[in-house]
Amino acid sequence: VSQGDTARGEGDRGIQALADRAVELVRSGDKVGLGTGRTAAAFIDRLGARVRHGLAIVAVPSSEISARQAQALRIPLIELNEGVDLDLTVDGADEVTPDLDLIKGRGGAMVRERIVAAASLRQVILVGSEKLVKGLGERGGIPIEIIPLALGLVTHRLKALGLRPTLRQGADGRTPFISENGNLTLDAALDMPLADRDTAALLDAAVRRIPGVVDTGLFLGTAERVLVGHPDGLVDVLLSKKP
Ligand code: A5P
């Protein structure tokens, strides 16, 4: 089952409408970062259709599954070059606040998603309206990717910060999930959602100071815009207040 099959199987009009709107943002000649997850997969499908009809773009995938999907659709893939030179990245997210801060990574690809987004001029996020939250952590824990050797140390330190980390399990439910970078992921639950961006940034910095932490799922101030899909197919556009 590909990451896009779920979206199609559910016939989710919201996701399809998001993909349609996002693909309108892509221009001929663009270099496009491809996110990961079922919403990103719906976008990649649409992008593939446009490429088939002559849209000249190249893309950088954020995961093996997105790479395979793009290859099957004959979307030309390139490597990241030195510097920031992608025009936009289109990706999903797990939570979005009114300030467009995000939690990502419940799909397990956040490290590469962050790299691809950081190499892009714009990060465009596609979410269903159920992902909108007042504070990050409202719908689940914060994904934290760690070097396997550091599992004990990081778990202990996260608890000292007041978080409740659990080791993410793989698809079999019995062995740990291993990221494409060969790492483990902890999902760190909070007692209450993070009040605002400053609170989230402080926590993010404290977590990143722990040796062995590779990345967190907190994406603060990275999104240029968020497209919000509703079940009836309507799409709202939320723009970052940043200049
Ligand atoms: C992958 O690591 C995540 O950041 C996804 O972008 C996020 O989980 C959203 O996925 P869905 O579009 O499948 O909900």
Image: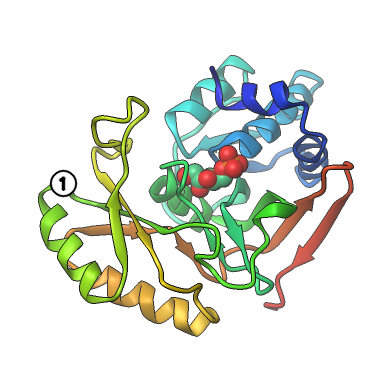
- Number of numbered labels in the structure image: 1
Q: Residues within 10 Å of mark 1 (few under 14, many from 20)?
A: some
Which residue position holds label 1? 148
Residue at x-position 19% and y-position 61%: 155
Q: Quadrant of the N terminus?
A: top right
The amino acid pointed to by label 1 is: Pro
* Residue 18: image location, x then y, percent: 78, 43
* Residue 21: image location, x then y, percent: 82, 43
* Residue 126: image location, x then y, percent: 69, 49
Q: Determine whether, in the image, residue 110 is placed left or right of residue 242.
A: left
Please say which color scheme the image uses: rainbow
Residue at x-position 32% and y-position 44%: 168
Q: Is residue 76 above or below residue 107?
A: above
Q: Determine whether, in the image, residue 152 is placed left or right of residue 42.
A: left
Q: Secondary structure at mark 1?
A: helix
Residue 154 in sight from this viewpoint: yes
Quarter of the rendered image showing ligand 1: top right
Q: Determine whether, in the image, residue 100 is placed left or right of residue 150.
A: right
Q: Quadrant of the C terminus?
A: bottom right
Residue at x-position 15% and y-position 53%: 151
Tell me the quarter of the picture where residue 211 sits.
bottom left
Q: Is residue 89 above or below residue 219?
A: above
Between residues 185 and 22, which one lies in front from this camera angle?
185
Q: Is residue 99 above or below residue 181?
A: below
Between residues 17 and 56, which one lies in front from this camera angle?
17
Between residues 50 and 45, which one lies in front from this camera angle?
45
* Residue 77: image location, x then y, percent: 53, 29
Residue at x-position 43% and y-position 78%: 201
